[in-house]
Image: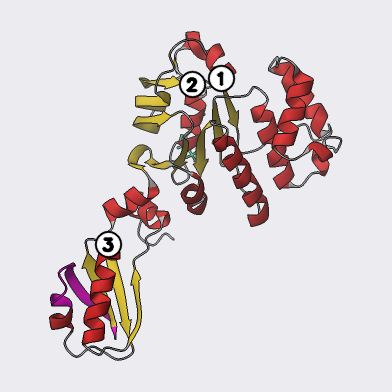
Amino acid sequence: MDGMQPSAALSADRLSKHFGDRVAFQDVSFEIGYGEVFGFLGPNGAGKTTTVRTLGTLLTPTSGTATVAGLALTPDNAVEIRRRISIMPESPGLYLRLTVLENLRCFADLYQVPTATKRIEHVLSAVHLTDRAQDACGALSKGLRQRVALARALLNDPQVLFLDEPTSGLDPVAARGVHDLIDELRQRGVTIFLTTHRLDEAERLCDRVAILNTTLRTIGRPDQLRDELFARTLTVRTAVPLGAPDRLFGSVTGVRAWHEDDLSTYVLTVDDPAQTAPEVTRALVQADADVLSISPSHHSLEDVYLELIDVPAGQP
Ligand SMILES: Nc1ncnc2c1ncn2[C@@H]1O[C@H](COP(=O)(O)OP(=O)(O)OP(=O)(O)O)[C@@H](O)[C@H]1O
C-alpha cells in the first residue's frame, strides 16, 4: 500500500442496509484498527452476514459511509477493495470432486494470484494441510474443508479477513483447530472481522466485540462490557449462618452493600474485589466465622449478550 496508512483498517459511519421495507441493519458505526480481531455477535437475522457482504462490496449500502482496508467504500474502489480483503463465507463452497490443490489452483487463477504455485504452498502450510493436498475435498471432514476454505481466503494475502461463522457445525476439536489458525493470523497482523454465535469463541479470540441486533447494542472489550453492565461482587459462603452479618460487613470499608442470597451465602457489592477480599477475610476471621469460600463474581460475555439483545420472555 502506498504512502500513509489510515489508522482504521475498517470503519463504518451510520451504515445501513435495507431490502425494500426490511431493515437488515441500521445506523451501524465502528472503527477497527489494523491487526485487531473484532467479534461481531448477534442473534439469527441480526444483520451480521449482510454487514459482511456490504463491507465486502457484494451489496451496496442504503445509506451511511465506510472505509475498508484503507479505502472509501464506493463503487469506484470496489475492485481494489476486493484485492485487499477476503471473505470466508459460512459454507465453504468448494468443488468437492476436485482435490484440495486443484481447488486452490482454480481460485488462484480466478483471483489472478501472482506466483500462484508458491502462494498455494504457503497457504496450505499455513492451515496445516500440506499432506492432504492430493485428497478430494469431498473426502474431507467438515473441519478440514473449513481449513481449505480458510486457505482459499488467504490466497490473495488479505489485509482484512472476514470470517462468517467459521466454526459453525464443527466439533470442539475441529473448532479449536480453526481458533489456533485465527491466532496465528492475528500474530501475522491480519485484521479479522469475525461473526459468530459462539460467545466463548468471541471471548477467547477477540480484542473487542460488537453486539448487533439490527442496530449496534454495544461495542468494547469483553471485560469492559462486563464491568459496565454488572456490579462487581464477592460471594461469601460460611458453614453456618453469621451471627451479626450487618455489623461484620458494615465494618469493612470496601463493601458498599450486601444481601443474603441463600442460607449462609452472602453477596457483597464492592468497588474492587481484589482489594476488598482480604479485608473481608480478616473481618470474618476476627468474628470466628467458619468460612467455606470467598469468590469474586464472574460474568461471562454470554451474560452481557443476553442482557443486551432483548431475548423475548420464554425463549431460551
Ligand atoms: N437478499 C436479501 N433480500 C431480502 N432480505 C434479506 C436478504 N438478505 C438478508 N435479508 C434479511 O436481512 C436480515 C438480516 O439477515 P442476515 O443474514 O444479515 O442476518 P444474520 O445476523 O447474518 O443471521 P444468521 O445469524 O441467521 O446468519 C434478515 O431479516 C434477512 O431475512
Q: What residue is at 65 percent from the left and 22 percent from the top?
A: 156
Question: Within the magenta stretch, is there residue 261?
Answer: yes
Quadrant holding the C terminus: bottom left
Determine which quarter of the picture holds residue 303: bottom left
Color scheme of the displayed model: secondary structure
Q: Is residue 260 magenta?
A: yes
Determine whether the residue tagged by mark 1 lies in a helix, strand or loop.
Answer: helix
Mark-to-mark CA distance, 3 and 1 = 43 Å
- State the image coordinates of residue 25 (x, y, percent, origin top left): 39, 33
Q: How busy is the neighbourhood of tag 1: few (under 14 within 10 Å), some, or many (20 plus)?
A: some
Q: Mark 2 near mark 3, Cβ–Cβ under 8 Å? A: no
Q: Secondary structure at mark 2?
A: loop
Q: Magenta stretch? A: 249-264
Image coordinates of residue 144 in percent, x first then y, are 73, 44
Q: CA distance from mark 2 to mark 3?
A: 39 Å
The disc label shown at residue 138, or none: none
Badge 3 amino acid = Arg
Above or below, 81 against 200 in this view is above
**Height in image: 154 above or below 1?**
below
Horizontally, residue 266 falls left or right of residue 179, namely left
Mark 1 lies on residue: 84
Residue 112 sits in quarter: top right
Q: Which residue is mark 2?
A: 69
- Name the residue type under label 2: Ala
Question: Helix or strand or loop: what does disc 3 sit on?
Answer: loop
- Camera sees residue 20: no
As drawn, the residue found furthest toward the top would be 76
Between discs 1 and 2, the one toward the N terminus: 2
